Amino acid sequence: MNLARRTMNHPALAAVYERAWRPALFYLASGRTTESDRRDAVSTLRLDGAKKVLDIACGPGNFTHHLSTALTGDGFAIGLDYSEPMLARAVADNTGPRVGYLRGDARVLPFADGTFDAVCCFGALYLIPDPIGATREMLRVLAPGGRIAITTSYRADNPFGDASRVVGGWSGLRVFDTRTFPDLFAAAGLVDIEQDVHRLLQYVSATRPE
Ligand SMILES: C[S@@+](CC[C@H](N)C(=O)[O-])C[C@H]1O[C@@H](n2cnc3c(N)ncnc32)[C@H](O)[C@@H]1O
């Protein structure tokens, strides 16, 4: 297990992740606050009503719970993660009437095709071995008309980008170019593909046609 994956599995990180680690590191990496990321996640995924939402690599549920608050009726949000310490924090800190958590591997999702109206994966594809396979799994469980949104690393096409790839490789974090995810979504037949880059992070979203 590489340094990044070991760190994510550590109980000490789970304890400080939502309040300190994520706000500080993601602000440095993107210039964006967790609050604005949460707000944009709800609008990008077009959450409302009785939608079914899957939050892949949910960590301590810091997005899962927020996403669930945009839902009503029979709507629910499931957070999936493989880290026991992270899921223990999710259950302690981010429960609610429309939230559930599941331990599992993003590369093999235990759901039928087309189960969810919205699927997201924030801040994790660079940690997951076989991130392309994991993204294909997200696409598999996305229903017609559904929305997908990811946030992951971005390698600028300049010396700074080269440096980020070296540091990423050393720590076990993968750094993606600009084409990987838009091309993957397009090849899967998705439409409305949008990509925003903020410093070292890219935000990509799309719709599966009806
Ligand atoms: C940086 S946290 C992201 C938490 C949250 N989504 C956010 O944006 O703040 C990354 C999470 O990815 C999870 N993870 C890494 N590989 C995974 C895999 N193969 N399957 C499920 N979860 C995984 C880790 O356990 C960790 O909780």
Image: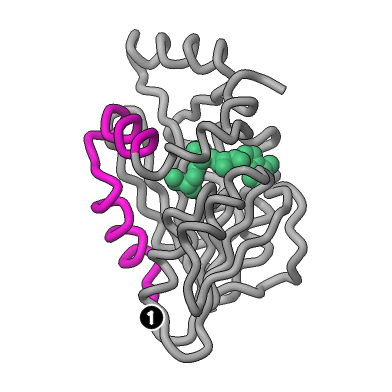
Q: Classify the position of the C terminus by image quarter.
A: bottom right
- Whole-percent x, y for residue 36 in the image: 24, 52
- Give yes or no for residue 71 being in the magenta stretch: no
Would residue 100 be seen by someone viewing this image from the given angle? Answer: yes
Left/right of residue 154 with respect to residue 166 in the rendered view: left
Residue drawn at the location 60% of the way across and 51% of the way down: 88
Nearer the observer, 161 or 54: 54
Position of residue 86 relative to residue 209, above or below, is: above
**The quarter of the displayed image where residue 91 is located:** bottom right
What span is colored magenta in the figure? 20-48
- Whole-percent x, y for residue 70 in the image: 36, 75
Nearer the observer, 172 or 86: 86
Q: Classify the position of the N terminus by image quarter.
A: top right
Position of residue 199 relative to residue 118, above or below, is: above
- Give yes or no for residue 41 being in the magenta stretch: yes
- Mark 1 lies on residue: 48
